[in-house]
Each structure stands twice: as structure tokens, then as C-alpha cells.
Image (cartoon, rainbow, N blue to C red):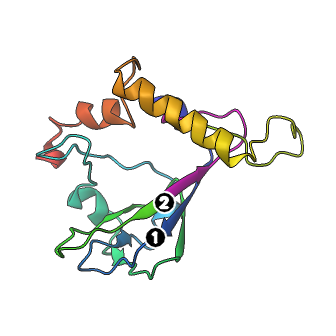
Amino acid sequence: MDEAVETEMLTVWIAVTDATEEMGCLAVVPRSHQAEELSLHCPGVLNPAENYIPQQILDRHGIPPKPLPCTAGSVVLLSRWTEHGALPNLSDQLRWSFDLRYQPVGRPTGRPAFPTFTARSNAEPEPVLIDPAGYAAVWDETRQRLLADAFDRLLYEQARWLSNRDNLVCA
């Protein structure tokens, strides 16, 4: 969401299962982070939450996306500027991953529906969450709230993605 546009953020993508090209592994545009531009995302055709970066946007870098096949346990680091997406899953297997984001304490995440916590802070060591049961409880509360439809804002960045549905590059 717009509130997080200026937030410095590192995404840590962790493969839980193998992620082959056939299974829809990540693909990145090499050196795209150097442009320091946030991508235009288009809502999916069947499900608006399944967003994608249109080919026209990927092509502006002059370099095709590079698939990043990974074995289970592999880690991919992405800046907030890195053009990335998943290839289509053409296999009969699921591709599982964790997508962790790190940003400075107190900065907006762009995903206000989901809980945040401080993993480490020299300046403010007290609110650091190191208890797995506490972390699980926070996520369970969030899950219950979302299932009860008690959250008054759109999830993820759907507001931005849905506003792009009539954009010509999304057609």
C-alpha cells in the first residue's frame, strides 16, 4: 500500500520444497533493483489476489526474467525494487515457500492486516518477540479476525492492484 512505498525492505524467500521451472519457481529481472522503481501489479483474471507484473513492465529493463530454480532450504534475497514473480506451475506438485520481510522498526509494512514483530533491535530490545508460542498466538488472533471479516482494510496491496485492473498494460 502507498503507506509503505518509502519503507526500506528486504524480502527473504525460503523454499520449503524444491522449486523447479516446471513447478513455477521465482524469476527475477537481473539488475532491475538499480532502477529503484516499484512495479505496476495487475490483478489476476480469475482471482484478483493473484497479481502479476505485466510483460510490458518487465520488458522495459531490456533483460528477460531469469528463472531461479531452487532446492528445498534455498534462500533468495530480494530488495523492494527487484522485479520478480513466479513462473506458472505446470506440474502436478505444490511449491511451498516462506516469504519473510524485514524493515526498520516502526516503518509501515504495506500489509497492515498481518501482525508485525521486532526480531532484533539494539535501540529497543524490550519489544523483541522470541517466544514461538507468542508468535503463533498473534497469528492465530489475526487468522480469527480475518475469518470473522473484522478487518476494515483490503489485504495485501489489493487496493493498488485492483485500481490497475483498467490499466491498458493489464489488458
Give whichever of 11, 28 is nearer the camera.
Answer: 11
The residue identified by callout 2 is 98
Q: Position of residue 45 (x, y in %)?
A: 12, 46
Q: Residue at x 39, y 17 (%)?
A: 152
Residue 167 is left or right of residue 58, and the answer is: left
Along the horizontal axis of the image, is 161 left or right of 107?
A: left
Q: Residue 67 shows which numbered tag?
A: none
**Residue 60 placement: quadrant:** bottom left
Write down the quadrant of residue 86 in the picture: bottom left
Q: Is residue 142 above or below residue 57?
A: above
Q: Nearer the viewer, residue 122 or 30?
A: 122
Residue 103 visible here: yes
Q: Amino acid at mark 1?
A: Val
Q: Residue tagged by mark 1?
A: 16
**Residue 119 image position (x, y, % from top left):** 73, 48
Q: Is residue 20 left or right of residue 137?
A: left
Q: Quadrant of residue 164?
A: top left
Q: Quadrant of the N terminus?
A: top left
Image height check: is 8 above or below 25?
A: above
Q: Which residues, given as a range, are shown in magenta?
A: 99-115
